[in-house]
Amino acid sequence: MEGSRDLPWAGLRALRALAEHRTMTAAAAALGFTTGAVSHQLTALSRALGTEVVRPHGRGVSLTEAGLALAERTEPLLAAQRDAVDAARAAGGGATGTVRVGAFATVAASLLPQLVARLAAAHPKITLVGIELTVDDVAGAVRRGDVDLGLGLDYPGAPIPRLPGTVLRPLRTERFELVSAATTDLPARLHLADVAELPWILPPLPTHFGVAVRGACRAAGFEPRAAHEVNDTSTTLALVAQELGVTLATPIMLSLRPAHDVRTTTLHDLVEREIVLLEPTTAPRRPAVDAVARTIETVVHGTGRPFSISL
């Protein structure tokens, strides 16, 4: 039986996510749904199309020829839908509606409360929905339209992906400091090479942060010895406070831990990262999204401890 020409948008998004992430579990995680919900969306898509888009494959599924052909064409379809919705909302005028902001955990803890408070005061008709993402998936989420805006991190040695359909706007440069337990007697200023023999609390590979930290240490002439590998900033700083190792952190990262718990040491080595705003290139853009983007810029510029700028 020939299927309907009206294909469900949720099914198209599920198909694109499956094509990109390869497994139902990963696709569901990227979309923020359960695997059961994604399976239901794909079934509805197959029913509307009149042919199956996935088939069982081992313990998972794979795309059929029809699914592959459709998946290759989902991006312009979904982009056109987003453009149409944004244009209709923009025509209504005013900064109103829901704006989805993708952010990594450090931002969710240190910046999101300030962002919500500022928006409530200046733009009470905007509803902000914060969506926690891994730093390395922010660009993809913006490109897919899963979020309206994304806050990401750009490291010189591990740059954030520059994906078609997105634009990257630098907001703030942060310089890393060495962080150790409050009881340590490290000097106020040192070279990374001076702590080559100490145990480290490292971000795991293959995260961009993990690559950046190891790259900085290698540039200083040593391979850091991992006492623990942790992806969460709060946990990392807690381990450092318990004298289990040293780490690198920036002012925004350090705002998650009481200052008296740890000791910061200025590095002669220049180790930096850029906080960036990732935006879709589609136009026109809703006034609410513009208002949130401006507020994000204000909040990011005004948050964190003073930077260390002396060499």
Image (spheres, rainbow, N blue to C red):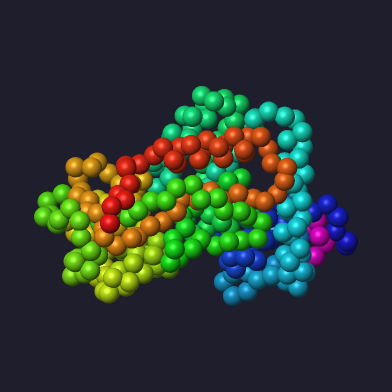
Q: Please state the total of marks drawn on the protein image.
A: 0
Asked where in the image residue 60 lies, by quadrant, the reply is bottom right
Image coordinates of residue 143 in percent, x first then y, are 63, 55
Whether residue 130 appears in magenta in the rendering, the answer is no
- Does 52 sit left or right of 129 as displayed? right
Answer yes or no: is residue 308 visible.
yes
Report x, y in % for residue 177. 28, 54
For the point 57% across and 27% down, which residue is it?
Answer: 123
Give the camera-side residue of 263 and 13: 263
What is the residue that sits farthest to the front in this orientation?
Answer: 311
Q: For the point 41% across and 56% down, which residue is it?
A: 273
Residue at image position (58%, 32%) is 127
Q: Quadrant of the N terminus?
A: bottom right
43 shown above or below 194: above
Q: Position of residue 40 (x, y in %)?
A: 67, 55
Q: Residue at x 33, y 71 (%)?
A: 219
- Quadrant in the picture for the C terminus: bottom left
| Stretch of the chain drawn in magenta | 47-52
Left or right: residue 88 versus residue 270 is right
Figure check: 45 above or below 226: above
Q: In this view of the protein, which residue sits in the foreground, 52 or 97?
A: 97
Residue 31 visible? The answer is no
